Amino acid sequence: MKRSSAMITKTTIRFAAVCCIILPVLSCAGGGTTQKPAEPAYSADSITLDAAIAEAASYFTGRLPKDAKMAVVPFDAPTGRLSDYVSEELWGRFEDSRNFVMVDRRNLGRIEAEIKHQLETGRVDDAQVVSITKQYGAEILVFGQITSLGSEYRMTVYATDVEKAASSQRAYIVRPDSRLSSLINASADDEIERAVSDMAKAVDRRTVIAVGRIGYADTGTVTGLSAWIKNGVIAGAQKQSGKFQVATEDESADFAVASRGVTVEIPLVNSIVQAVVTGNYLPLDNGAEISLRLVSTTGNRAVLSSAKFVIPAAELERRRLSLLPVKDNTVITKAEFEAKQEAVDPYAGKNNRWTFTVTPDVLDGIYYEGDLMSMQVYSQRDCYFRIIHIDVNGITQVIYPVSANDNNFIRGGQTRRIPDNTRFRMRPPFGEEIILAAAYDRPFTPGQQPGTLSKNGITRGIEVESDDHTTMMPSATAKFSYTILPRQ
């Protein structure tokens, strides 16, 4: 990367990041006899999906209060098609029993979002379920989840009695059959489109949305998979033109600057963007689990809707997508990735004395070769700061301040764009790169201190020498990672 301006007189800096990676395709050759793999052994108490649905409906129909007002929301499941099928089948069976009064389906979106959020955080809070369900007059709420057990699945069905604020549940081991296979093997494109369609149901009027960061776990890392999901979300939103209007690149950039990324601390009154899609993905043995959220940018930044689905490993391989970053067109190992995360941990801002942030000028942290980049530094208090760049090969370099002419003082409540009068241009090598920022109480002597990425090296790197020749540690730190992809 280099600065793009007639005023370029300073050091040229390379910036790079993540690209899509070709995963190995396994094949066999030769004329030998291929042995048919053994059929998996299923649990003695396993049943088919349809049998599990029938048993659950029968169980709860015989035990729940007659004529109760019931709501059934989509299940938390590996695919949207499976989720829809189970909830629709249960709904139909409860309705056919004539034991219950079924809640209008149009009123289920908010209930569904709350239940999904609780399932994603690993808890099912009866009090919260009761509170949100009462708003829509339901007395019984039925929901559940389906999780993989290897060759089988566990289907858990919950029924919450709103008046008694208590839940009962039934769990079933489900073995694969043609029905389950057809529902599990949904295409990734269909899953993203369905997720966006569900989000559209959560808004009452046409809403301007932007797509924010969709990163690996909670690390902030974005990869080729992030870019692919973003494009899928945009394509899905464009099909929901009655509910969504996708912000232009300029509008998204303006929102990124105004909100310092997606850390919206106050309502953005003048922002055209009304909601942001964010998310993350987690590795599974057989693929990746994707979680998306539609978050309002006004008021209390409420989660309007959420969705979760799985992209199978075969689909990731077919699309040549990797969960981890790449370096020199090769996926880095998980151990190397974790070592990098540990090394930059001192910049995580865990012990900050005041609010201090550094964010890229794009919401998603993805740049393409030739793009221009700047960053926004914000500080709650007056301070002096410096910024370190870590390239794809782990080489660290101070990029601000680099001379006595660079003004590294920032007023409390102020947001500064760095660099001051120019921007950085993205160029190879491709791979993940990182920006680290540190804030200090007093002015200090600028220094380059280049080196290689390591935990000890970064710890030493955040020490500076003040003008009175004393050593200082930062009062606040911040970081972000970004990627540079080859332009297609």
Image (tube, helix red, strand yellow):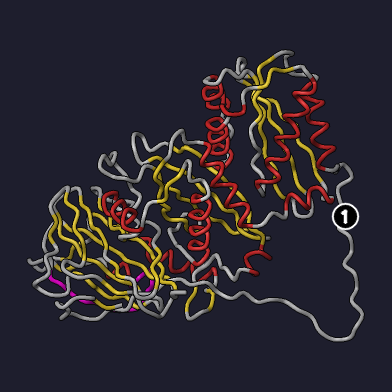
Percent of width and height locating residue 245: 42, 47
Give the overall secondary structure of the magenta segment. Answer: loop
The image quarter containing residue 465 is bottom left
> Is residue 251 or residue 111 the one in the foreground?
251
- Residue sticking out furthest to the front: 242
Circle 1 SS class: loop
**Residue shown at 48% from the left, 81% from the top:** 328
In the image, taking residue 229 as reference, residue 94 lies left or right, namely right
Badge 1 amino acid = Ala
In the image, taking residue 88 as reference, residue 239 lies left or right, namely left
**Residue shown at 56% from the left, 30% from the top:** 111
Percent of width and height locating residue 85: 72, 40
Q: Is residue 472 above or below residue 91?
A: below
> Would residue 454 be counted in the magenta stretch?
yes
Q: Is residue 221 above or below residue 445?
A: above
- Residue sticking out furthest to the bottom: 30
In the image, taking residue 345 as reference, residue 56 lies left or right, namely right
Q: Is residue 288 above or below residue 12?
A: above
In the image, taking residue 388 as reference, residue 18 lies left or right, namely right
What's the magenta region? Answer: 445-457
* Label 1 environment density (alpha carbons within 10 Å; few <14, some 14–19, many ≥20): few
> Is residue 210 or residue 137 the one in the foreground?
210
**Residue shown at 43% from the left, 53% from the top:** 211
Percent of width and height locating residue 104: 61, 24
User: What residue is disc 1 on?
Assistant: 41
Percent of width and height locating residue 29: 81, 84
